[in-house]
Image: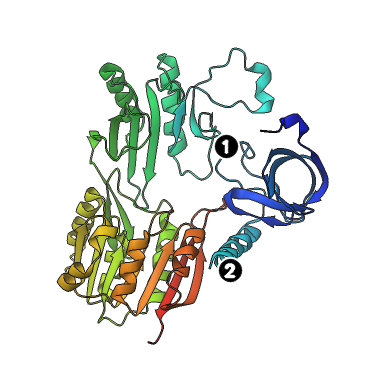
Amino acid sequence: MRSNRRDYPVLEKVEILDAGSEGKAVARVEKMVVFVPFVIPGDIVDIKVLKRKKSFYEGKAIKFHHFSERRVEPRCEHFGVCGGCKWQNMSYEDQLFYKQKQVYDNFTRIGKFTCSNRKWLIDKDKEESNNENMNGIGFHLVGMFDRIIDLKNCYLQPQPSNQIRLAIREFAIENNFTFYDTKAHCGFLRNLIVRTASTGELMVIIIFAENEEVNITRTLEHVAGAFPQITSLMYVVNTKKNDTINDQEILLYQGTPYIFEEMEGLRFKVGPISFYQTNSLQAKKLYEVAREFAGFTGTETVYDLYCGTGTITNFIAKSVKKAIGIEYVPSAIEDAIVNSAINEITNTHFVTGDIAKTLNEAFFNLHGKPDIIITDPPRSGMHPKVIEEILNARPEKIVYVSCNPATQARDIAMMQESYSLVKSQPVDMFPQTHHVENVCLLVRKED
């Protein structure tokens, strides 16, 4: 039986001890761990408990008795309610410290913009909320799937991303377009994706939830006219109850159905559903670390698992004998092949397929066993079958790139009998947030 929230205690003068996962800071009261958002280590606060479990509380700070020396003034007016930059109140030097600590702790313990008709009003705006239009385009409110922050400006977005978002919102309101209701699953405007390349090319994808052809055309015409710098303008009509567009027809309205990224003189074609790191400058750093850890001599056969559009595969190709990329998204593999051709790379080979089913002895016999494996799986980590086949292949080295150090540590623990963890290097792809990428080097143990 659930306890009534009114019975939950207020914990007084609690010192915040650590910065934890999911952007929540950590405190301890007797034997209970307490998770609190938007506070930082060194703060001393009163905490209102909002959720009680067997071994931990979740709560919010309702009074500050002491502010940590690590604290800085957040730049963004939306800090505290937006689900984006949860560490913006902490100095960047300390952000890096706690990201590295997060990686260390995991290994020691474990071994789009969205359109909505339910925007969140910041406290100072609530007095004027009775007549205010509740439609907005922005990021999700912390912990609420059906509410968004109607951002005036997001400092993580290079212009003209903010102007495009605000222009679409204004045009929609002026024309009485409906905004998507995630509970009722209805409304015209649903999602907005803006991708800005290091080359200056700009991709915009507008997702509509209703197939109103006239209004779709009007919206696209308005955006194209207002922002001629858009090089790829596309749209999707998604009437499903989930937001994924990988299985939807993505229609080109104007420009090209792709943009190009550049890295070390290489050009990469990126389509609407192709994965490419959002922080292109740090992506280069990430791949440089992976290449350095691998220590190529030029004689190796390398497998690149979860290769996406072949960014890593092509990035390392000049340093190896042969690079084989495997990815389950067919359109990504099509782009990977094009990327090799564009850059006149001839020693790559790409395979489409579920890696858990594709990677097996027959595959090794066909392509040769790898000397080195590079793997960059999704947040959920690698399927146990993939780990089993990696161990069967017995590469000399494994370079594991991950956006989730917890699942990375779990997977590496499953390989520790055969491989030694030699190096680990976090890379900050997402400043002002708790997210961190991590690169690990595993070396095969002697028999």
Left or right, 76 with respect to 351, comes to right
C-alpha gap between disc 1 and disc 2: 29 Å
- Dot 2 alpha-carbon crowd within 10 angstroms: few under 14, some 14 to 19, many 20 or more: few
Q: Does residue 393 appear to the left or right of 418 in the view shown?
A: left
Toward which corner of the image does residue 286 lie, by quadrant? bottom left
State the residue position of label 1.
143
What amino acid is labelled 2 in the image?
Thr
Residue 147 on image: x %, y %: 53, 29
Q: Read off the residue under disc 2.
A: 108
Q: Is residue 87 visible?
A: no
Residue placed at 25% from the left, 64% from the top?
359
Position of the N terminus by quadrant: top right
**Residue 221 at x, y percent in the picture:** 29, 25
Q: Which residue is drawn at 34% across and 73% down?
A: 391
Please state if 32 lies on the left or on the right of 361 as rendered: right
Identity of the residue furthest to the bottom in this view = 446
Q: What residue type is labelled 1?
A: Gly
Give the mark nearer the N terminus: 1 vs 2. 2
- Residue 306 lies in what quarter of the image? bottom left
